Image (spheres, rainbow, N blue to C red):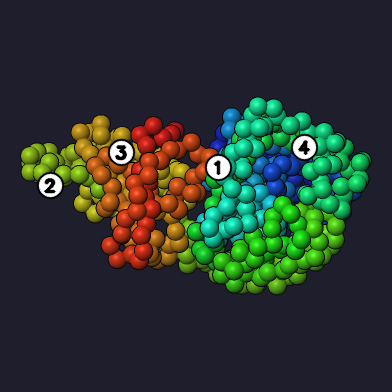
Amino acid sequence: MGLSETRYAQSGDVAIAYAVAGEGPVDLVLTPGSFSHVELLWQHPLFAAFLDRMASFSRVIVFDKRGTGLSDRVKKIATLEERSDDIRAVMDAARSERAVLMGVSEGGPMSIIFAATYPQRTAGLVLYGTVARSTWAPDYPWRPTEDEYRRWIREEEQSPSPITEESTRTMLQEFAPSLAGDAEFARWLAMVSRTSISPGARLDLTRMNMEIDVRDVLATIRVPTLVVQRASEMIVKVEAGRYLAEHIPGARYRELPGDDHLMVAGDSESVTREIEAFVADLPADVSEPDTVLATVLFTDLVGSTATAAELGDRRWRELLERHHAAVRGELARFRGREVDTAGDGFFATFDGPARAIRCARAVTDAVGGLGLEMRAGLHTGECELLADKVAGIAVSIGARVAAQAAPGEVLVSRTVKDLVAGSGIRFADRGTAELKGVPGEWQLYAVEQDGETQ
């Protein structure tokens, strides 16, 4: 069947390469792992056969993530937020209103973010051989430690490992043991790897991946989900797949025999059978989502009562109008949505935490230029959609975080910090705090003044 000619979707200032195969009744967006090449990768018989099989029951949309394959090279590897934007751009360009997202390996977390943030555009979510967190944690012990990651990064910085047939055959011993003895496949895969991603980009990817943690997002997924995991593979331990299925509401879990991480290696037909059955079972009736993953922003002017008394009613009203205009200008710039305005405070939502942080910093600076001082707080979580309003515990947490902020400070929850890995935004640890009316203790972080605002 094969792929269509390569086309490009514009995502911000980056062109994303994509292609389409099949004409099935359901769109399926395949989000690749660490590297891909929409033309070279799918020319190999193993990949071509897998694509043809998927295209027999769906319209498959494949793409190269920014910085890899035929997509634009970028100065740094993108954040999960930017990559989710790329999925949306590809869907728009391919005229796909709703699609099943299939996140493979490193493509899993960005697919998780998209599905939680845009449930109205996600018919279903398939996760294959992927993780919710990249590094070890007390409750996530099956991943490498940060020290192990950092040691590998230092070694690569000092002497980048060339991607050769020999190194690829060594890699395949864990990545796809069933193909480790195939010299021709190793030679071909090494060529595709070299063509798809540069040594510097590979290092940037590892740095960003080290910080990935989408565990807090899993419970907010409200679309049908299938988790497929091979039982004996070494790259992603079986516990990681089980964890996903246990923490995503209503997820279907399929644990298959085999030790290949590479999706097309080994018994790939068992993988496609599970995906086809899942797609066939998707509900025909589409209802509007009543919850979404969103980042909430609360702002509040410091000492406004005293300032109003000093200026008088008319001059304070004029200053407040300038304040409102400044805030609304930055909200428009960073794709924020104003939900409510009460006195001198704003409540807004964003579809990405990095945009929300940069907006908060830009608003703080703009308000400072008016001689005013502001505090701001952000949290990312599941929000209930109520007509043109939003509600829920995430909203309450965001308001409580803002109340903890010092004058001139942008304060965020740990969830926000975890989700902006690779953004270049830096944080100062503000310790834990009890938030009024919210159970438990919450780790809070202040956005440093030199965090990016562009």
Please tell me whether mark 2 sits on a helix, a strand or a loop: helix
User: Please, what is the three-letter code of the amino acid marked with disc 1?
Assistant: Thr
* CB atoms of marks 2 and 3 within 8 Å: no
Residue corresponding to mark 2:
305
Distance from disc 1 to disc 3, alpha carbons, whole Å, reads 24 Å
Can residue 153 be spotted in the picture?
yes
Category of crowding for the residue at label 3, using alpha-carbon neighbours closer than 10 angstroms: few (below 14), some (14–19), many (at least 20)? many
Residue corresponding to mark 1:
79
* CB atoms of marks 1 and 2 within 8 Å: no
Percent x, y for residue 142? Answer: 63, 57
Q: Which mark is residue 193?
A: 4
Residue corresponding to mark 3:
364
User: Please, what is the three-letter code of the amino acid marked with disc 4?
Assistant: Ser
**So how many labels did they put on this image?**
4
Percent x, y for residue 340? Answer: 31, 55
Q: Residue at x 54, y 52 (%)?
A: 213
Category of crowding for the residue at label 4, using alpha-carbon neighbours closer than 10 angstroms: few (below 14), some (14–19), many (at least 20)? many
Distance from disc 3 to disc 4, alpha carbons, whole Å, reads 44 Å
Distance from disc 4 to disc 1, alpha carbons, whole Å, reads 21 Å
- Which of disc 2 and disc 4 is earlier in sequence? 4
**Left or right for 45, reference 129:** right
* Vertical relation: 79 (above or below) 125: above
Q: Nearer the viewer, mark 3 or mark 4?
A: 4
Please tell me whether mark 4 sits on a helix, a strand or a loop: helix
Please tell me whether mark 1 sits on a helix, a strand or a loop: loop
